[in-house]
Every structure is written in C-alpha cells, then in structure tokens.
Image (cartoon, rainbow, N blue to C red):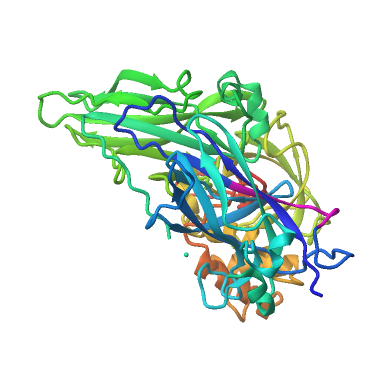
Amino acid sequence: MKKIFYLFLIAGLAVTSCNKPTAIAPEQDVIFTAVSLESGLKSSDTDGDICNNDVAHYAKLTIQQLDESGNPISGTSIDKIVDIFYLNGMMYTNTLRLIPGKYQLTAFSLWNQGPDNATGGDDDIMVYATPNVDSEYADLVDALPQAFNVNAFLKNEVPIQVLCFEPAEFDKFGFSWFAIDYTTVDNNDMFFYGDFCTKYFKDYEANEFYDDQMVGGSLSHDMIAIYKIQVLKEDENQDWDLIETYTNETSSVSGEPLIIPHPNTDVVGERFKFKLFILVKDGNSFSYKKFKVWVVTDDEKIDSGDNNIIEFVLGSCTPEADYILPPYMNLPENATLTTISSIPGSLGTYFDVTLSNIGSGYDIQNGNYGVYCADKDEEITLNQEYNMNVFTSLYIDDIPDAFSLQKPVLDNINWLGNNLYRYEGHSWRDIQNAVWMLLGQITETENGGALAPTALAIKMKNDARDYGDNYLPPVGGYAAVLFISPDANDTNTVLQLLFTLVDP
C-alpha cells in the first residue's frame, strides 16, 4: 500500500487590531505554518516512509464562513493561492486576512510550480493535500472540513494535517479565489497600519515596544511594525519644515492603526511630505530608519487602495499590502575587505574574501565569505586589503548611480540566488557566467577568452530574466550584499563590484 506521511499545519491567527474606529477594516492576519515530523508518522503502511515528492511552492485553500451555530453560510466560500516559504524547518504561507468570526477550512493542498517555475501553470503538481472526511484516507488525519475561529485581539492556532499526494490516489482523498470587502473610511484623517516580516523576530524581544506585542502570545516572523511618521510642510523657500511626528509605540499592543490628521489648510498649492521610519535592529541596538517618503498636494491623500487604510509591510510576507517594502537587512555602513589570492575560492564561489572591523549583531560578521563579481570589465586586485562601503541589493536608490548597469538586474540576481536548487549539478562558474550574461558583459558563446557558458548557465540566465523582475526574497531567503568603494560616485565605480549572498 502507498506509504504516506503527514505534516502538522498550524494556522496562526496573528492579531492585528483592537478598539479600531468602526470605519476601519477589521480583518485579522492569518498565517498557516507547517512542520515535517521525522518520527511517529501516521501512515497507511507500518514503516511510515517519508514523502519523496517535490518541494511545495504555494498553497491552495478554500475557507467558508459559519454562522453562530456553526452552520455553513451559503455563498461565503473564498478561494486563495498563497505563496509559501521555509524557515527554520517550518513551512509558512504568506499572510491572509479574515474578519473575526467562525470559519471552516474545506480544501487545503500544497503545490510545486513545475518546470516553468510559475504559479498556476498547467504543469503544476499537487504534492500534499488534506483528505475529505468521507474519503478512504480520512482516518489517517484530522480530515476536512475543519472548523476554526478567528478571534479579534487573540492569537489562535488551528492544527491542520496534510498527506503526501499521488495523482493515482485522487479518489482516496475524496476530492476553489479570495475577495475581501473593505469598509471605506469617510473622513479627512489618514490611517496607517504596518507589518514587519523577519526571520530574526526573536531578536526583537529585546526591544520594549516589540516585546509588548507578546501579551497573550509570542512574536512571529510577521510582527506589527513599530514606526514613526514625520509630517512636513514645504515653505516659501522650498525647504521642508517639520509639523509633527506621530508614532504607534504605545498603540501597537492593541494593533490599532495610527491615525494622522491631514495637515491641509485653505491655502491652495500647499505641499506636504510624510516620512516613514521603522524601528529595526542596527547591529545589536535598535534605531528608526527611513524606508518610505510620500509627497501630496493640498488635500490629496496617500494612495491606500479600496479601504483608505495605508497598509505597508517591511518584507514580503503580506502581499496584499498597499506598499510592500523590500526586506530589511541589518548591515554595517562599512567593512574592511581583504581579497584572497586564488580563483576559484575555497567556498564554492568566484573567489574568497575576509571581512573584518565589523561590529557585532549584523547580518554579516567578521570572517571569510565567498563572493561573485558583478562587473567583469572593472578590476580589483587579489591578496589586497580594501575599505569598502556595504549596501543591500534590495534598496537600489541608495547605491551610487555609477552602477547603472547593475541596478536593473539585482532583482534577477536575487531570484537566481534563491532558486539555485532548481539547477542540479551547477558550478560556481555557471553562477558567475549567468550573472555576467544578465549584465550583458558576456554572450552565450563568448566569455572574453575564458570558458564559454554552459547550457545550464544559459538556462539560469534565461530563467532569472523571465521570473526575476521585481523579485523580493521571502523571509529566510537570500539577498545580495554589495561591497563598493567609498570613492565611488555617480560616474565612477572605482573598483570591481563584489557581492555575496546573505540570509536577510
């Protein structure tokens, strides 16, 4: 008989609001997580082999509302495709939002994207699923439908189980998309709400404002962001004068939105600026860093979608937010970089470097790193020490304009760095040649006298082009960290651009 194993799935209902004004959308965050158990597996066979299906990339689920008596409400089924990512041996979906109430999960399956690396294609493969209650496999797990509550202001966990799926056993499982109706705010105030996604969420327990969120639960990879918003007004000299600073430091515990009165007066042509600062780790300390600026004229409001709530997320785990800011990387401003004397390096990359003079607590530390080159036509000397500025590839506006060749493809490079598992047998040279091809510095047949790119390197380049535009790494993914000469400016790169992949 087919060997089956199961995953325990936890639907974590992360609370995000309390005592909101009646005009504010009352949805609560819903996060599904999964953990694979290596022992004690329920199975249709006695030895319980683990599932050898392909990795899952996204989830399909169907949720239906229930009335107060627990009966399904006709016409309330909602279907959703949700990306998933892996973090510390767990599997997480991106965040959904549901209005508090009673629900039942009527369908849940996990899918592999298939050869085209795209969600929703005809070649996608179901790899795990939860059977229905009247199916042959129902006695192996807690079958569907399964009721659960979404409670306002509480953290709820609902265990769900899935079985390894084979198409030939479709009948043994007994085997639909998501429209949230928002309430519109009808006044001149502006409402801000923010999430912060990070795999290092436990580090934030050391901060009093993030720690306050642990009342009745614990921090998770999707936290309520602690932030400040400066409101400024342009004066007659076109300088910006600070009007007021607003913060959610005290209201984040209840998940209330930050309400900011619009500063507009009767004067025509006034311009206002709103600067968003989010509290993040800076080494081992915490500080507010600027992540976003909005400029409006007169009574114009910041774009906030259908519900007039300006929703932002730092990171990529809440894809329905109005403003998705790239993941935060806790990086030092500069570091001493010493190149090693041989190519290839000992760490499986183009060559090695040693980083030093980095303070504690950052995402990169003193030690050896494998690096790649992002500028074949610029030089750098091996076995030499350099003072370098450190940049994340996720915020390209901060990178000197001399790197105009690299900026447009950093998202493609980051996609490649997070999808190397797709290219079995690849070498460091394949990665390096794929990067140089993305930059247009070599062709598919010519590598400046060196070895021409392999067919695998060409596929890596083509896939990164096809799927990497506007790519943001998931929580626990990888992003390129760039090392740039402090003398670089808008016209001169000075040194070869080096990068390494770091887990943000």
Quarter containing the C terminus: top right
Asked whether residue 380 is in view, the answer is: yes
Residue 302: image quadrant is: top left
Q: Is residue 170 above or below residue 268?
A: below
The boundaries of the magenta stretch are 32-41
Q: Is residue 101 left or right of residue 285?
A: left
| Quadrant into which the N terminus falls | bottom right
Q: Is residue 45 left or right of residue 439?
A: right
Residue 173 colored magenta? no
Q: Where does residue 294 sit, x and y in percent of width and height?
A: 32, 36
| x and y, in percent, of residue 405 in the image | 49, 59
Residue 293 sits in which quadrant?
top left
Q: Is residue 252 left or right of residue 387?
A: left
Question: Is residue 325 among the parts visible in the rendering?
Answer: no
Q: Residue lying furthest right in this view?
A: 47
Residue 470 versus residue 347: which sits nearer the camera?
470
Position of residue 378 measured from the top left corner of the image (x, y, whole percent): 60, 58
Is 353 situated above or below 415?
above
> Within the magenta stretch, is there residue 36?
yes
